[in-house]
Amino acid sequence: MRHKLQNKGLTLVLVMLAGVSGSYSALAENKASISKGKKLYLQNCVFCHQADAIGKPGVAPSLTNPELLLTASDKFMKGTIRDGRTGTGMPPFAHLGKKGIDSIVAYIRSYEKKPSQAAAIDKQPQALGDERLGKLWFDQICSTCHGVNGDGYLEGGTGTAIGNASFLSKVSDGFIRETIKYGRTNTRMIGYSGPEAMANLSDKEIDDIITYMRSLKH
């Protein structure tokens, strides 16, 4: 009996040690990926997004913004890096390969303050609003930064091209909804939900805007 208990104890210890070894291995692999990603970032992304990835108004958005990192999925970021944004200053970087792009995303994720909520956000229901009403809100609020056609920087705006097909084909309605509601700290994108907001938009009104944005795609 004692021999069996000793064997069980030894097995448990070995399993625990294997788990610790696996954790260290994963941590080391992640650190290596972040290091590689930083190097690639400084070689390819720094010219527009700046050395600290904080971006530059009218040129490129911040990649370290906490709300962006909270709402954007890895799939969205990797797809954007790989394909770029046609009609904007964001070129495709498919030549970096899957591992290179994965490393850049790992580096960007190293700026996270909270775990990503993208999985739950992307599962939010599709916006089924009124396109005509959405255009009214868009023209009154969104166009001041993003341009009347949603072309962003190309129209001289300080906001990104949210009418761009490359953006709209990759982003979920939940992502857009959360961004409109809560904005992005330390940027010109303020939140539009709540009594203290510049415009306290209802969920229905926000869905109207999203539905109109989906009609742009240019």
Image (cartoon, grey):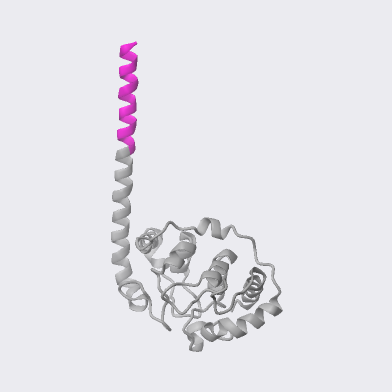
Q: Nearer the viewer, residue 192 or 68?
A: 192
Across the whole image, how many numbered discs are drawn on residues?
A: 0
- Quarter that holds the C terminus: bottom right
Image location of residue 112, percent across then percent down? 38, 61
* Chain part drawn in magenta: 1-19
The question of residue 14 being in magenta is answered with yes
Q: Residue at x 50, y 59 (%)?
A: 118
Quadrant the N terminus occupies: top left
Which residue corresponds to the image point at 37% horizontal and 75% vertical from the top-left?
Answer: 49
**Res 77 quadrant in image:** bottom left
Q: Nearer the viewer, residue 207 or 154?
A: 207
**Which residue is farthest top?**
1
- At which x and y percent is residue 123? 59, 57
Q: Position of residue 158 (x, y in %)?
A: 46, 84
Q: Is residue 146 magenta?
A: no
Extreme residue in the bottom direction: 156
Q: Is residue 155 above or below residue 40?
A: below
Residue placed furthest toward the front = 195
Q: Residue at x 46, y 72 (%)?
A: 184
| Occupied quadrant, residue 81 | bottom left
